[in-house]
């Protein structure tokens, strides 16, 4: 998304704020904090619970965001700090794809709480939330299009 905005292919993009600064002439407009929650297949032992312990993820098949993405880096960092070696069985680009694979029983996965109707998902039992900051990325050297301005104003 960042590359497409930089190349002018997109007027703007909603991204996870990366750890490194964006290249010029891109700018970020902070939008919202987003909690990442664990979802599991319906018949999984963790199904129906509200919390999980990272140790319970050891050896558990995980459906993850693609390697190299900012959200994946957050998840990998949390797993590493907990000493968990994940068994990654699939890497995908979209929340919807991850939700579909989890529903099919492929493995567990982390998704945005906003992606779940009415909330839901499991959060870490120790109270340490797994979160990310979402922001709008756009070119600072171009005036936004009418559609981009309308979208930005709808974000509040």
Image (spheres, helix red, strand yellow):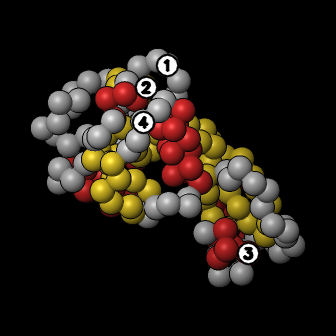
Q: Is residue 34 visible to the viewer in this orientation of the structure?
A: no
Foreground label between 4 and 3: 4
Question: From mark 4 to mark 3, how far is it between C-alphas?
Answer: 36 Å
At a point 74% along the width and 66% down the height, the residue shown is 138
User: Dot 2 corresponds to which residue?
Assistant: 124
Position of residue 147 in the picture relative to residue 29 (left or right): left
Residue 133, compared with residue 145, is above or below; it is above
At a point 54% along the width and 32% down the height, the residue shown is 81
Question: From mark 4 to mark 2, how far is it between C-alphas?
Answer: 13 Å
Residue 102, compared with residue 66, is above or below; it is above
Sequence-wise, which precedes: disc 3 or disc 1? Answer: 3
Sequence-wise, which precedes: disc 3 or disc 2? Answer: 3
User: Dot 4 corresponds to which residue?
Assistant: 84
Question: From mark 3 to mark 2, how far is it between C-alphas?
Answer: 36 Å
Residue situated in front as seen by the camera: 151 or 59: 59
At a point 17% along the width and 54% down the height, the residue shown is 104
User: Dot 3 corresponds to which residue?
Assistant: 6
Position of residue 32 in the picture relative to residue 50 (left or right): right
Sequence-wise, which precedes: disc 4 or disc 1? Answer: 4
Sequence-wise, which precedes: disc 4 or disc 2? Answer: 4
For disc 2, the neighbor class at 10 Å (few under 14, some 14 to 19, many from 20) is some
In the drawing, what numbered circle is on residue 127?
Answer: 1
């Amino acid at each position: 998304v960042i590359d497409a905005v930089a190349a002018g292919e997109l007027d703007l993009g909603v991204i996870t704020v990366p750890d490194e600064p964006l290249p010029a002439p891109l700018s970020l407009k902070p939008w919202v904090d987003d909690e990442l929650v664990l979802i599991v297949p319906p018949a999984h032992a963790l199904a129906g619970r509200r919390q999980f312990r990272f140790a319970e993820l050891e050896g558990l098949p995980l459906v993850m965001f693609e390697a190299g993405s900012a959200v994946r880096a957050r998840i990998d960092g949390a797993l590493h700090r907990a000493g968990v070696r994940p068994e990654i069985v699939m890497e995908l680009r979209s929340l919807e794809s991850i939700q579909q694979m989890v529903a099919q029983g492929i493995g567990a996965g982390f998704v945005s709480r906003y992606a779940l109707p009415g909330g839901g998902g499991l959060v870490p039992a120790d109270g340490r939330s797994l979160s990310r900051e979402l922001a709008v990325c756009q070119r600072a050297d171009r005036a936004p299009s009418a559609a981009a301005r309308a979208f930005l104003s709808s974000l509040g």
